[in-house]
Image (tube, grey):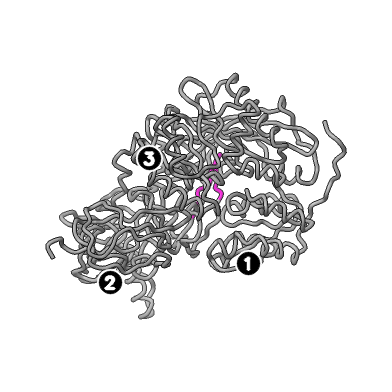
Amino acid sequence: MGGAVSAVAISSILIANRGEIACRIIRTARGLGLRTIAVYSEADRGAPHAVMADEAVMIGPAPVGESYLRSDRIIEAAQATRADAIHPGYGFLSENEAFAEAVDNAGLVFIGPPAKAIYLMGNKAEAKRRMLAAGVPCVPGYEGDDQDDLAFAEAAQDIGYPVMVKAAAGGGGRGMRLVDEAGELADALGLARSEAASAFGSDELILEKAVLRPRHVEIQVFADKHGNFIHLGERDCSVQRRHQKVIEEAPCPVMTEDLRAAMGSAAVDAAKAVDYRGAGTVEFLLDAAGDFYFLEMNTRLQVEHPVTEMITGLDLVAMQIAVAQGEELPLRQDDLKLNGHAIEARLYAEDPSRDYLPATGRIDLWRPAAGEGVRVDAGVATGMEVSPYYDPMLAKVIAWGETRDVARTRLVRALKESALLGPTTNSSFLVDILQRDAFIHGEATTAFLDEFYTGGFVADEPGGADVALAAALLLDDDRDAAFAAAGYVSATQLGWSSAPLSPIPLHLTTDRGVFDIGAECLGAVWSVTVGDDLFAVALGQRTDHAVRARINGRTIDAVAAISGSDIGLSVSGKCFRFHRARPGMEDDAAGSSGRVVAPMPGLVVDILVKKGQKVARGDALAVLEAMKMQHQIAAPIDGVVTGIDASKGDQLASGDLMIDIGDAAE
């Protein structure tokens, strides 16, 4: 199906990425007998991907612009370690045509598509023009060179509201804003330009007609150097927050054979239009009538590729490597067989109850689930720090089943059994989504989260039994430490104490309140009062952070990690972090004063107010960038700005004072 293609033997691969995708590529490469080289930043020293690889090279400081986006340092690392090829993973430089070209010019194999294909599909405006020419269905929109606000305003009026503002040079939800009416357009353009420039180095934008309540369905395509093009079925990625995917599944719940054939054919046509090679994903919006529209093409491996692997039995990374070596695809379109159903959930370090605010900090414990049909792709480990410099995704939990509901219930169980203690995660939110009737019945669209979480997600609050268990564990550790210091055998091992402790006052705080507790050791049982409730807590043997306890006669299995005055606790998939506070400590809840502090480490993108300016609760005060997203900082109270302690360009730590708001009467 094409001219002669020279083969190239790859024996060593440098992975130009980090986290779970770097670990995932290393696993396949090593399974193929290949030598692997990792790169890492100063923040990722000792990270799992650097430890897993045969060699690891430090390429710069933590900020991505000084490390993972430094193509020169990555190529130098590949040459210094005698790598044959570079795999870019996803994100970072994976869709950067200049990087692909530089890799080729350095005499290395780029495990991805040709630079020209990356360019043609990487710019949404150019890609859309190509797709229209190829006959691929597209959403009406504006892809013009005139980037003036007036040009966008006129185009939006012609298209008709609502419209979607998008970054032309990238994806992943960055630089994307939904605009419902003309008065919102200017602000949306400003925010989108700023975010796009920061994420992709280009502030070029496009407009598209907003297709309301569609499904987001993408087709996995593959092409080799011999002219063979195939698709590997679809994935439904409709459950999204901020236009970033949260839950993905394959196949799509409403897919038919005819629709799959039509979408698959359109996706292959899109790939042929740019002479594609390797793995790619063509994304579509699918409306209720069964009509579909080209959205974009991602010229790389997708985060959600495991669900395709689980229903096809294929290793997509191995296929990428084979194609890069000049081999033919291992199957033709008629060979494709889909088996069962797979669903993936993205575990993020963020707080869904606080507008998905990113979380950082030390991971006190990471214990992933295992079991039939369960796969966990992760790039984290106990003891490592979740930094503000990178995307907040920590792991992907995937489950396969003979039917969709078997896959769903397995995934719920796997999420509950995967414990990550330390930074706040979205684990409970993921479980809640999977147990909603609309998701159970396969009815989720891109409007799912807006429709079913109109007031936001209500975070798990620790119940009295959870607090009592945390108190008993902390105090049991105190008692064991005291016995050990005195040369005695642990009271936990003995199961009794000949000298019970006197009643102990204890104050445990969470980020949502303070619990005043009274506790007394009665032999092998702790008697714990939490408010007006009394709990009898009998602790069983603790092994590898797992503890079984009986609380008021009921057996509870939990995972716990104690670090100094802090304790992380996971009970039935719900995670809590308690801090042992000083007596009399009061809750300083967010919004209880006019002190506005940075809710996370981040870069100050803009200060939107001036000293002496009147503000109302909810007014935007500043824009903070963290974990590759921009967040508006709002006024917690009505008042007057009495002090501004941060400036544009400042790098803040969590808790740093930004703005003071005083009483308007002052």
Upstream in sequence: badge 3 or badge 2: 3
User: Amino acid type of disc 2?
Assistant: Ser
Upstream in sequence: badge 1 or badge 3: 1
Quadrant of the rendered image containing residue 314: top right
**From the viewer's perspective, is the residue at label 1 or at label 2 nearer?**
1
The residue located at (40%, 64%) in the rendering is: 648
User: Amino acid type of disc 3?
Assistant: Asp
Q: In the displayed orientation, state which residue is furthest to the right.
A: 4
* Real-space Cα separation, disc 3 to disc 2, in angstroms: 46 Å
In x, y percent, where is residue 231?
66, 31
Magenta-highlighted residues: 367-377
Q: Any mark on residue 498, and which?
A: 2
- The residue that label 1 is drawn on is 59
In x, y percent, where is residue 213?
42, 29
Question: Is residue 288 found left or right of 277 in the rendered image?
Answer: left
Residue count near mark 1 (Cα–Cα under 10 Å), binned few <14, some 14–19, many ≥20: many
**From the viewer's perspective, is the residue at label 3 or at label 2 nearer?**
3
Residue count near mark 2 (Cα–Cα under 10 Å), binned few <14, some 14–19, many ≥20: few
The residue located at (55%, 46%) in the rendering is: 170
Reply yes or no: does residue 374 show up in magenta.
yes
Q: How many marks?
A: 3
* Real-space Cα separation, disc 1 to disc 3, in angstroms: 40 Å
Q: Any mark on residue 432, and which?
A: 3
Question: Is residue 111 found left or right of 386 in the rendered image?
Answer: right
Upstream in sequence: badge 1 or badge 2: 1
